[in-house]
Image (spheres, rainbow, N blue to C red):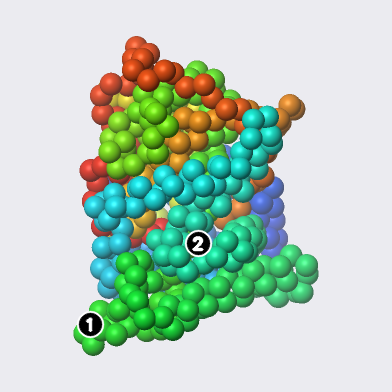
Amino acid sequence: MNRVAPEREHAWRVGTAPGIFPFIGHGIALYRRPLAFLNSLRAHGDLVEIRLGPQRAWMVCHPELVHRVLMDSRTFDKGGPLYDRLRPLLGDGVGTCRHQEHRRQRRLLQPDFRTARVADHTAWMGEEVESVCREWRAGRQVDVSATMLALTTRVVSRVLFCDSLDATTAAEMRGCLATIVRGLFVRTVVPVDALFRVPTPANRRYRRAEDRLHAIVDAAIAERRGGTSDRTDVLGTLLAATRDQGATAITEQEVHDQLITLLFAGAETTALCLTSALDMLARHPEEERRLHAEVDAVLDAGRLPGPHELPRLVRTRLVLTETLRHRPPGWLFTRVTTKETELAGHRLPRGATVLYSPYLLHHDPASFPDPDRFRPDRWLPGQAVGVPHKAMIPFAAGSRKCIGDTFAMAEATLALAFVARNWRLRHLPGHVERLRPAATLGPRSLVMVCEPRAPRPTGTPPPADSPKSRAVAAPGVHDPRTAGGDCVDDA
């Protein structure tokens, strides 16, 4: 047996979650009240046994143990119910491939996501934000969830396919992604294949969405192969690799799998982060006022945000970092052990399912006092230093850390700044937000009323309480101005 000494002396607690039902295990609790169920687990131990359907699984509830899992991807490999469900959709792309394939795939894709390349994209990111908000009118209701998903789909498809997708196809792709994300969660918490082979309307919708998404990507690849020009996008990088005669050569199937993976990971999660940020700002007027003061100062004269504005959008990054803590879009992940090992002093057999939850870690009062409170100032210099380094993991950690974290943070920062510079969003009367987590977490049908803003006159100094110094990047949160980008996707 492989025995690994714990990182430090600790009296680890190992327990079992109560409320196991025959056949479905904890599936009802995870499906009906998933966030409350997660938060209840730490009372039962640092490593807690749960049941996913009839299968035993272990939830890791302590940040040090989660860190060990993430840093040892050879032992705790991509696998378990989540990735078993993702692989038929995503294939063996960078987000789902096994450990032995990961490094080769990472080296192929990484140049397209390095900091310098992301900086080159910021100008047209601003253009895309302006384009999707162009039809907003004073006093009108806006489907914020749909608008942010339209934005992120346009941005990621531009990085992947350049201009290969028309507006109708892009809209169809967004609908497919939304259907798939909703269906993935129930397939993860109740991993009983027979249930999903029954031709119910929901199962048929899920299958149609999968098939159509694959067809859209295949058509984009075929269209590019029929052309004569090489474009500087991810598809161009991948097609060039198929012509390589060396060790970096890839197959036609891998081109498809990488595009599907990056599309799936790049659109939904960033859209949910932005939607959640706008939702939380409307709930906290003082935080909204501080953000408005910053964007009025940085984006004066109606200027679109770009690479030169990113370093100055300090408050904007604080809001997004706190949003990622409060509502991490990627909220539940699974791993599988490749050999017998030990975790928290407990022996795990080969093939054991191990789960970790950024949401659970981010709402632990031991790491984040008053965890349910939305408080961006907890990431200011002098305060963020009190956050345990391993407790904040919106983009995972280790060699499988998200390949697009730099890109996503830059995109979200520019988008939130532009919207806040021009619009104030208000909830509808009687609005009550009921989060229903799926494969990702965040509002999926948020409708708000938009009001045009009268920004602070150019040249007026920002208020005294606006942050003057560089914000501390949250532990595990990528700073788009300084961080490297050599990491790999976990969602």
- In what element is the residue under mark 1? loop
The first of marks 2 and 1 along the sequence is 1
Q: Residues within 10 Å of mark 2 (few under 14, many from 20)?
A: many
Tell me residue 295's x, y (percent).
40, 28
The residue lying at 40 percent from left, 39 percent from top is 304
Q: Name the one closer to the observer, 10 or 379.
A: 379
The residue lying at 51 percent from left, 78 percent from top is 218
For residue 247, which quarter of the picture? bottom left
Q: CA distance from mark 2 to mark 1?
A: 27 Å
Q: Which residue is mark 1?
A: 247
Q: Which residue is mark 2?
A: 264
Tell me residue 19's x, y (percent).
66, 49
Q: State which quarter of the image contains the C terminus.
A: bottom left
- In what element is the residue under mark 2? helix
**Numbered mark located on residue 131 in the image:** none
Residue 254 is at least partly visible in this image? no
Tell me residue 393's x, y (percent).
38, 45
Q: Name the one closer to the observer, 453 or 262.
A: 453
The residue lying at 57 percent from left, 70 percent from top is 213
Q: State which quarter of the image contains the N terminus.
A: bottom left
Cβ atoms under marks 2 and 1 closer than 8 Å: no
Q: Residue furthest right?
A: 200
Query: Vertically, is 233 above or below 394?
Result: below
Tell me residue 197's x, y (percent).
71, 75
Left or right: where 330 falls relative to 248: right
- What's the amino acid at mark 1? Ala
Q: Name the one closer to the observer, 177 or 98.
A: 177
Left or right: where 481 falls relative to 167: left
Query: Vertically, is 254 above or below 343?
Result: below
Q: Residue furthest bottom?
A: 245
Left or right: where 192 falls relative to 351: right
